[in-house]
Image (cartoon, rainbow, N blue to C red):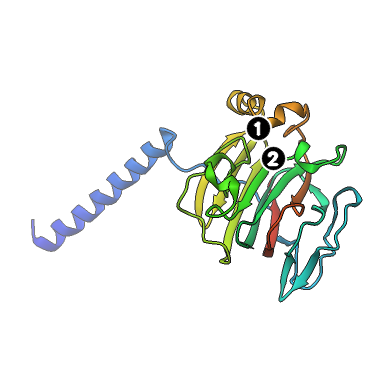
């Protein structure tokens, strides 16, 4: 067999084997699952207006301002919530926190209680190096506050921008920080239930149980906080 023909035959055989391997991988269930159907991205802050946000249960919004294209607070003030409710979604927010600053992003929050954290899980926003909550991972930046700890090593220091991504789809929740997946958990699952029972949230019977609710931003703690590039898309 001359060299050109032999080379062509080897290429053809390689294609056939590759196709078989691909089929076997798919049949074994190891191929990637298809992506969830997602709606279009919707901005929750355009850099100019806070019209898509309001105060939680009439709390004060006096401490919140639009500064240089960011949604900013520099003192304790009321918590914010979106005007719309969301069930299954992917949320992205860039945030920068001041020295010893402490805040959080709530999801699926409801308004039947005095405080949103009585109903809503919280993605912790924190200056780990200087805030007291940074002494333990279960209350550090990126944690599911007081329920699931986040790993260290991905947070940018106080005064620098961080990028957060939160996915909530059915009972499945993921926390991401600066391109790294920090944690995942199942709302209502045995592990989650045991952790909540062992936390301060055991006192709140509806904690984390709402199927839909508001996105919230914690405002009542000390420290500067700036937010930008806030957008969300619903998952179906």
Instruction: Please report the residue visible at 40 percent of the width from the left and 32 percent of the height from the top.
Output: 28
Above or below for 90 versus 23: below
Above or below for 127 versus 228: above
Q: Residue 230's quadrant in the figure?
A: bottom right
Q: Residue 173's quadrant in the figure?
A: top right
Instruction: Please report the residue visible at 86 percent of the width from the left and 37 percent of the height from the top.
Output: 113
Whole-number angstrom distance, CA of label 1 to CA of label 2 = 10 Å
x, y percentage for residue 156?
Answer: 51, 60
x, y percentage for residue 117?
Answer: 75, 41
Mark earlier in primary sequence (1, 2): 2
- Residue farthest toward the bottom in the current orientation of the protein: 68
Name the quadrant of the N terminus.
bottom left
- Residue farthest toward the right in the current orientation of the protein: 58
x, y percentage for residue 25?
Answer: 38, 38
Above or below for 110 versus 3: above
Residue closest to the eye, 133 or 217 = 133
- Residue farthest toward the left in the current orientation of the protein: 1
Residue at the disc numbered 1: 187
Left or right position of 146 against 204: left
Left or right position of 229 against 34: right
Residue at the disc numbered 2: 121
Are dots 1 and 2 in contact, CB under 8 Å?
A: yes
The answer to whether residue 179 shows anywhere in this view is: yes
Q: Disc count in the image?
A: 2
Q: Residue 142 carries which label?
A: none
Q: Residue 96's quadrant in the figure?
A: bottom right
Residue closest to the eye, 27 or 106 = 106
The answer to whether residue 40 shows anywhere in this view is: no
Residue closest to the eye, 1 or 47 = 47
x, y percentage for residue 59?
Answer: 88, 52
Residue closest to the eye, 42 or 164 = 164
Instruction: Please report the residue visible at 29 percent of the width from the left and 51 percent of the height from the top.
Output: 15
């Amino acid at each position: 067999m001359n060299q050109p023909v032999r080379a062509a035959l080897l290429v053809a055989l390689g294609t056939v084997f590759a196709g078989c391997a691909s089929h076997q991988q798919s049949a074994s269930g190891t191929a990637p699952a298809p992506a969830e159907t997602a709606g279009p991205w919707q901005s929750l802050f355009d850099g100019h207006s806070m019209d898509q946000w309001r105060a939680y249960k009439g709390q004060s919004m006096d401490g919140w301002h639009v500064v240089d294209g960011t949604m900013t607070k520099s003192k304790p003030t009321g918590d914010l919530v979106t005007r719309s409710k969301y069930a299954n979604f992917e949320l992205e927010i860039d945030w920068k926190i001041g020295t010893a600053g402490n805040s959080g992003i709530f999801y699926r929050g409801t308004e039947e209680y005095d405080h949103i954290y009585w109903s809503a899980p919280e993605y912790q926003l924190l200056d780990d190096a200087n805030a007291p909550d940074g002494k333990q991972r279960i209350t550090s930046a990126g944690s599911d506050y007081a329920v699931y700890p986040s790993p260290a090593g991905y947070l940018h220091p106080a005064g620098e921008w961080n990028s957060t991504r939160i996915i909530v789809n059915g009972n499945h929740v993921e926390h991401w920080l600066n391109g790294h997946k920090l944690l995942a958990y199942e709302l209502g699952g045995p592990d989650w239930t045991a952790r909540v029972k062992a936390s301060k949230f055991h006192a709140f019977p509806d904690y984390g149980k709402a199927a839909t609710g508001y996105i919230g931003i914690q405002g009542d703690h000390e420290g500067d906080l700036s937010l930008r590039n806030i957008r969300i898309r619903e998952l179906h």
